[in-house]
Protein backbone atom coordinates (compact mmCIF):
# COMPACT_ATOMS: atom_id res chain seq x y z
CA UNK A 1 0.00 0.00 0.00
CA UNK A 2 1.42 3.42 -0.95
CA UNK A 3 1.58 6.31 1.46
CA UNK A 4 -1.50 8.00 0.01
CA UNK A 5 -3.57 4.90 0.71
CA UNK A 6 -1.95 4.57 4.12
CA UNK A 7 -2.80 8.12 5.09
CA UNK A 8 -6.37 7.77 3.80
CA UNK A 9 -6.88 4.58 5.79
CA UNK A 10 -5.38 6.09 8.95
CA UNK A 11 -7.54 9.18 8.57
CA UNK A 12 -10.71 7.13 8.11
CA UNK A 13 -9.90 4.98 11.12
CA UNK A 14 -9.12 8.02 13.24
CA UNK A 15 -12.30 9.77 12.13
CA UNK A 16 -14.26 6.61 12.94
CA UNK A 17 -12.88 6.55 16.48
CA UNK A 18 -13.68 10.23 16.98
CA UNK A 19 -17.18 9.69 15.62
CA UNK A 20 -17.69 6.73 17.95
CA UNK A 21 -16.40 8.65 20.98
CA UNK A 22 -18.47 11.75 20.32
CA UNK A 23 -21.73 9.96 19.48
CA UNK A 24 -21.49 7.24 22.18
CA UNK A 25 -21.23 4.56 19.50
CA UNK A 26 -18.12 3.42 21.40
CA UNK A 27 -20.40 2.03 24.12
CA UNK A 28 -21.17 -0.87 21.77
CA UNK A 29 -17.50 -1.85 21.86
CA UNK A 30 -15.87 -0.80 25.15
CA UNK A 31 -16.86 0.29 28.67
CA UNK A 32 -17.78 3.91 29.32
CA UNK A 33 -14.58 4.73 31.22
CA UNK A 34 -12.48 4.19 28.09
CA UNK A 35 -14.00 7.11 26.20
CA UNK A 36 -10.97 9.41 26.66
CA UNK A 37 -8.67 6.73 25.23
CA UNK A 38 -10.96 6.22 22.23
CA UNK A 39 -10.91 9.96 21.49
CA UNK A 40 -7.14 10.15 22.02
CA UNK A 41 -6.56 7.24 19.66
CA UNK A 42 -8.65 8.98 17.01
CA UNK A 43 -6.63 12.18 17.31
CA UNK A 44 -3.32 10.28 17.14
CA UNK A 45 -4.37 8.39 14.01
CA UNK A 46 -5.51 11.54 12.24
CA UNK A 47 -2.23 13.27 13.16
CA UNK A 48 -0.30 10.26 11.85
CA UNK A 49 -2.28 10.38 8.61
CA UNK A 50 -1.43 14.07 8.18
CA UNK A 51 2.26 13.43 8.87
CA UNK A 52 2.31 10.56 6.38
CA UNK A 53 0.73 12.71 3.68
CA UNK A 54 3.13 15.58 4.41
CA UNK A 55 6.10 13.23 4.07
CA UNK A 56 4.76 11.94 0.76
CA UNK A 57 4.47 15.47 -0.64
CA UNK A 58 7.93 16.60 0.34
CA UNK A 59 9.25 15.54 -3.02
CA UNK A 60 10.42 12.12 -1.91
CA UNK A 61 7.88 10.29 -3.99
CA UNK A 62 9.57 10.21 -7.44
CA UNK A 63 10.45 6.56 -7.12
CA UNK A 64 6.87 5.77 -6.28
CA UNK A 65 5.86 6.79 -9.80
CA UNK A 66 7.37 3.47 -10.94
CA UNK A 67 5.98 1.34 -8.13
CA UNK A 68 2.21 1.61 -8.14
CA UNK A 69 0.54 -0.65 -5.62
CA UNK A 70 -2.58 -2.49 -6.80
CA UNK A 71 -5.79 -0.51 -6.43
CA UNK A 72 -7.33 -3.45 -4.62
CA UNK A 73 -5.55 -2.25 -1.49
CA UNK A 74 -8.18 0.48 -1.25
CA UNK A 75 -10.65 -2.25 -0.33
CA UNK A 76 -9.05 -2.15 3.12
CA UNK A 77 -11.09 0.99 3.72
CA UNK A 78 -14.36 -0.95 3.49
CA UNK A 79 -14.23 -2.43 7.03
CA UNK A 80 -13.57 1.05 8.39
CA UNK A 81 -16.54 2.49 6.51
CA UNK A 82 -18.65 -0.38 7.81
CA UNK A 83 -17.87 0.69 11.38
CA UNK A 84 -19.21 4.15 10.57
CA UNK A 85 -22.33 3.07 8.68
CA UNK A 86 -23.35 -0.08 10.57
CA UNK A 87 -23.51 -0.02 14.38
CA UNK A 88 -23.47 -3.53 15.84
CA UNK A 89 -26.22 -4.39 18.32
CA UNK A 90 -25.33 -4.87 21.95
CA UNK A 91 -24.93 -8.47 23.07
CA UNK A 92 -28.27 -9.89 24.11
CA UNK A 93 -30.30 -12.96 24.95
CA UNK A 94 -28.44 -15.43 22.71
CA UNK A 95 -25.13 -14.69 24.45
CA UNK A 96 -26.79 -14.71 27.86
CA UNK A 97 -28.52 -18.04 27.27
CA UNK A 98 -25.25 -19.71 26.27
CA UNK A 99 -23.06 -18.17 28.98
CA UNK A 100 -23.24 -18.87 32.69
CA UNK A 101 -23.93 -16.07 35.14
CA UNK A 102 -20.80 -14.16 36.04
CA UNK A 103 -22.01 -12.95 39.43
CA UNK A 104 -19.05 -12.30 41.73
CA UNK A 105 -18.97 -11.72 45.46
CA UNK A 106 -18.48 -7.99 46.01
CA UNK A 107 -16.07 -6.53 48.56
CA UNK A 108 -18.97 -4.78 50.24
CA UNK A 109 -22.33 -3.14 49.69
CA UNK A 110 -22.84 0.64 49.57
CA UNK A 111 -25.54 2.02 51.83
CA UNK A 112 -28.99 2.32 50.29
CA UNK A 113 -31.57 5.08 50.85
CA UNK A 114 -33.59 4.35 53.97
CA UNK A 115 -37.01 5.12 52.48
CA UNK A 116 -38.90 4.82 49.23
CA UNK A 117 -38.56 2.50 46.23
CA UNK A 118 -35.06 1.32 45.37
CA UNK A 119 -33.67 1.56 41.85
CA UNK A 120 -31.04 -1.18 41.53
CA UNK A 121 -28.93 -2.67 38.78
CA UNK A 122 -29.27 -6.35 37.97
CA UNK A 123 -25.82 -7.12 39.37
CA UNK A 124 -26.44 -5.02 42.50
CA UNK A 125 -29.66 -6.87 43.29
CA UNK A 126 -28.14 -10.28 42.52
CA UNK A 127 -25.09 -9.59 44.69
CA UNK A 128 -27.13 -8.35 47.65
CA UNK A 129 -29.62 -11.22 47.32
CA UNK A 130 -27.02 -13.99 47.08
CA UNK A 131 -24.09 -12.74 49.14
CA UNK A 132 -25.90 -10.32 51.44
CA UNK A 133 -28.81 -12.67 52.13
CA UNK A 134 -31.16 -9.89 51.06
CA UNK A 135 -30.80 -8.03 54.36
CA UNK A 136 -30.89 -4.60 52.70
CA UNK A 137 -33.69 -5.59 50.30
CA UNK A 138 -36.40 -6.99 52.52
CA UNK A 139 -39.73 -5.18 52.72
CA UNK A 140 -38.64 -2.71 50.03
CA UNK A 141 -40.17 -1.96 46.65
CA UNK A 142 -37.49 -2.62 44.04
CA UNK A 143 -37.15 -1.42 40.45
CA UNK A 144 -34.73 -3.12 38.08
CA UNK A 145 -34.21 -2.82 34.32
CA UNK A 146 -32.78 -5.50 32.07
CA UNK A 147 -33.50 -7.61 29.01
CA UNK A 148 -35.28 -10.93 28.88
CA UNK A 149 -33.68 -14.26 28.10
CA UNK A 150 -35.21 -17.72 28.30
CA UNK A 151 -33.53 -20.99 29.16
CA UNK A 152 -34.26 -24.24 27.32
CA UNK A 153 -37.21 -24.93 29.59
CA UNK A 154 -38.68 -21.51 28.82
CA UNK A 155 -37.95 -20.05 32.27
CA UNK A 156 -37.48 -16.25 32.07
CA UNK A 157 -34.50 -14.32 33.39
CA UNK A 158 -33.83 -10.62 33.63
CA UNK A 159 -30.27 -10.03 32.42
CA UNK A 160 -27.65 -7.34 32.06
CA UNK A 161 -24.30 -7.94 30.39
CA UNK A 162 -21.25 -6.71 32.30
CA UNK A 163 -17.93 -5.60 30.85
CA UNK A 164 -14.40 -5.99 32.14
CA UNK A 165 -13.01 -3.96 29.25
CA UNK A 166 -14.88 -4.41 25.99
CA UNK A 167 -17.81 -6.20 24.41
CA UNK A 168 -15.58 -9.16 23.56
CA UNK A 169 -15.38 -10.10 27.27
CA UNK A 170 -19.01 -9.29 28.16
CA UNK A 171 -20.64 -11.74 30.57
CA UNK A 172 -24.21 -11.90 31.89
CA UNK A 173 -25.61 -11.52 35.37
CA UNK A 174 -29.07 -13.03 35.69
CA UNK A 175 -32.13 -12.74 37.90
CA UNK A 176 -34.84 -15.41 37.73
CA UNK A 177 -38.40 -14.06 37.62
CA UNK A 178 -41.45 -15.24 39.52
CA UNK A 179 -44.77 -13.69 40.49
CA UNK A 180 -46.79 -11.49 38.15
CA UNK A 181 -44.80 -12.25 34.98
CA UNK A 182 -46.23 -11.09 31.63
CA UNK A 183 -47.87 -14.07 29.88
CA UNK A 184 -45.80 -13.59 26.73
CA UNK A 185 -42.11 -12.72 26.92
CA UNK A 186 -39.86 -12.34 23.91
CA UNK A 187 -36.08 -12.67 24.22
CA UNK A 188 -34.20 -9.34 24.08
CA UNK A 189 -37.24 -7.38 25.26
CA UNK A 190 -36.15 -4.72 27.75
CA UNK A 191 -38.32 -4.54 30.85
CA UNK A 192 -38.56 -2.16 33.77
CA UNK A 193 -39.66 -4.41 36.61
CA UNK A 194 -41.12 -3.48 39.95
CA UNK A 195 -40.91 -6.26 42.51
CA UNK A 196 -39.88 -7.58 45.89
CA UNK A 197 -37.00 -9.59 47.23
CA UNK A 198 -37.53 -13.29 47.76
CA UNK A 199 -34.99 -15.69 49.32
CA UNK A 200 -35.69 -18.24 46.60
CA UNK A 201 -32.68 -19.14 44.45
CA UNK A 202 -31.79 -21.39 41.57
CA UNK A 203 -28.67 -22.45 39.69
CA UNK A 204 -27.67 -21.38 36.23
CA UNK A 205 -28.21 -24.32 33.84
CA UNK A 206 -25.01 -23.38 32.02
CA UNK A 207 -22.45 -23.19 34.85
CA UNK A 208 -24.41 -23.89 38.07
CA UNK A 209 -23.77 -20.34 39.23
CA UNK A 210 -26.17 -18.85 41.81
CA UNK A 211 -29.18 -16.95 40.48
CA UNK A 212 -31.57 -15.19 42.87
CA UNK A 213 -35.27 -14.78 42.18
CA UNK A 214 -37.22 -11.54 42.06
CA UNK A 215 -40.95 -11.57 42.78
CA UNK A 216 -42.48 -9.41 40.07
CA UNK A 217 -45.44 -7.18 40.88
CA UNK A 218 -45.39 -5.11 37.69
CA UNK A 219 -43.43 -5.20 34.43
CA UNK A 220 -43.48 -2.82 31.48
CA UNK A 221 -41.47 -2.82 28.23
CA UNK A 222 -38.96 0.00 27.83
CA UNK A 223 -36.58 1.08 25.04
CA UNK A 224 -33.01 -0.18 25.02
CA UNK A 225 -31.08 2.07 27.44
CA UNK A 226 -28.44 4.52 26.32
CA UNK A 227 -25.70 2.27 27.72
CA UNK A 228 -26.95 -1.32 27.52
CA UNK A 229 -24.03 -2.77 29.46
CA UNK A 230 -23.67 -2.92 33.25
CA UNK A 231 -20.30 -2.30 34.88
CA UNK A 232 -21.41 -2.38 38.52
CA UNK A 233 -20.75 -6.09 38.94
CA UNK A 234 -16.99 -5.74 38.42
CA UNK A 235 -16.32 -2.42 40.13
Image (spheres, rainbow, N blue to C red):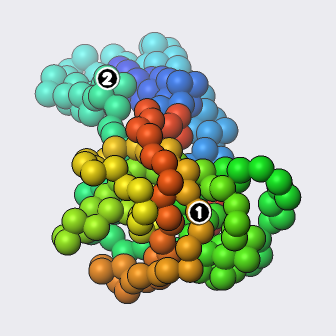
In the picture of the structure, the residue carrying the numbered disc 2 is 85
Quarter of the view holding residue 164: bottom right
Q: Residue at x 39, y 83 (%)?
A: 203
Can you give x and y, in whole percent of width and height, for residue 110 in the image?
Answer: 80, 65
Disc 2 or disc 1, which is closer to the eye? 1
Sequence order check: which comes first, mark 2 or mark 1? 2
Instruction: Residue at 45% x, 46% y: name it.
Output: 219
- Image quadrant of residue 113? bottom right
Regarding mark 1 in the picture, which secondary structure is present there? Answer: strand
Q: In the rendering, which numbered label is found on residue 98?
A: none
At 69% across and 70% down in the image, what residue appears? 138
Q: Answer with the quarter of the image where residue 123 lies.
A: bottom right
- Residue position marked by numbered label 1 in the rendering: 196
Asked whether 6 or 78 is in front, the reply is 78
The Cα–Cα distance between marks 2 and 1, rounded to whole angstroms, is 42 Å
* Mark 2 neighbour density, 10 Å: few (under 14) some (14–19) many (20 or more): few
Amino acid sequence: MNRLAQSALLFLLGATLLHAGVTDLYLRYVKAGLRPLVLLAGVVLIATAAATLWYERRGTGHEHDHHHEPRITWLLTLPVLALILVAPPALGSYSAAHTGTALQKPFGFPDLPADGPLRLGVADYAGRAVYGDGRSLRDRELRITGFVTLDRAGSPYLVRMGLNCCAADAQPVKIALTGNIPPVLSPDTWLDITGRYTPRRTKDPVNDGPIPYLEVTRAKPVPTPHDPYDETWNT
